[in-house]
Image (tube, rainbow, N blue to C red):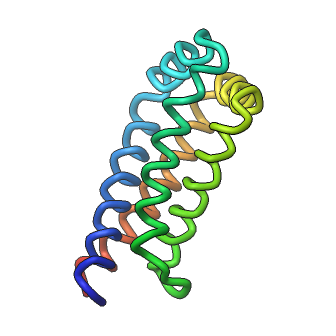
Amino acid sequence: MDDLTRAVEMFVSINLIALGASFLLRPGDWKAFLAHLQSKGTAGSLPLALIGLGIGSFVVAFHNVWDGVPMIVTIYGWASLLKGAFQMLYPQVALKRIEMALRMGAGLWRTAGTLALVCGVLVLRYALQG
């Protein structure tokens, strides 16, 4: 594994672990953040789009591994890129997704957090072994 591939895996694992822990421990804060973005109308979807596009384009540009644990990173990158681009082009649909997330109970936020945390730990463990 080359250094750049490992660096991208570390980057994604850190992001997934932090995001997962935050979803687990602070679901109410995430709902408040999304409610704030929703109150801004279609412009409120742009920060989420920019984050997804930024992370996704970085991963897609530098990590193209389609087997084993590293595939989690590649899939995460493509999903983030496509989601970010879609949110930029169709902000009204992004607002509907925000509305759906606001209706989610804390249990679903914690489930998403657990999934992100597990994926992050798997990728981190793999990257550290390389």
Report the residue at 53% width, 40% height from top: 110
| x, y percent for residue 20 | 43, 47
Report the residue at 40% width, 44% height from top: 19
**61 relative to 83 in the view: left or right:** left
Report the residue at 58% width, 11% height from top: 40
Q: Quadrant of the C terminus?
A: bottom left
Report the residue at 39% width, 73% height from top: 62
- The residue at the far top in this view is 39
Q: In which quarter of the image is the N terminus?
A: bottom left
Rendered image quadrant of residue 46: top right
| x, y percent for residue 5 | 33, 78
Give above or below for 44 relative to 6: above
Give above or below for 23 relative to 69: above
Give above or below for 93 relative to 5: above
Give above or below for 104 relative to 80: above
| x, y percent for residue 42 | 66, 20
**80 relative to 123 in the view: left or right:** right
| x, y percent for residue 129 | 25, 84
Residue closest to the eye, 36 or 115: 36
Residue closest to the eye, 73 or 121: 73
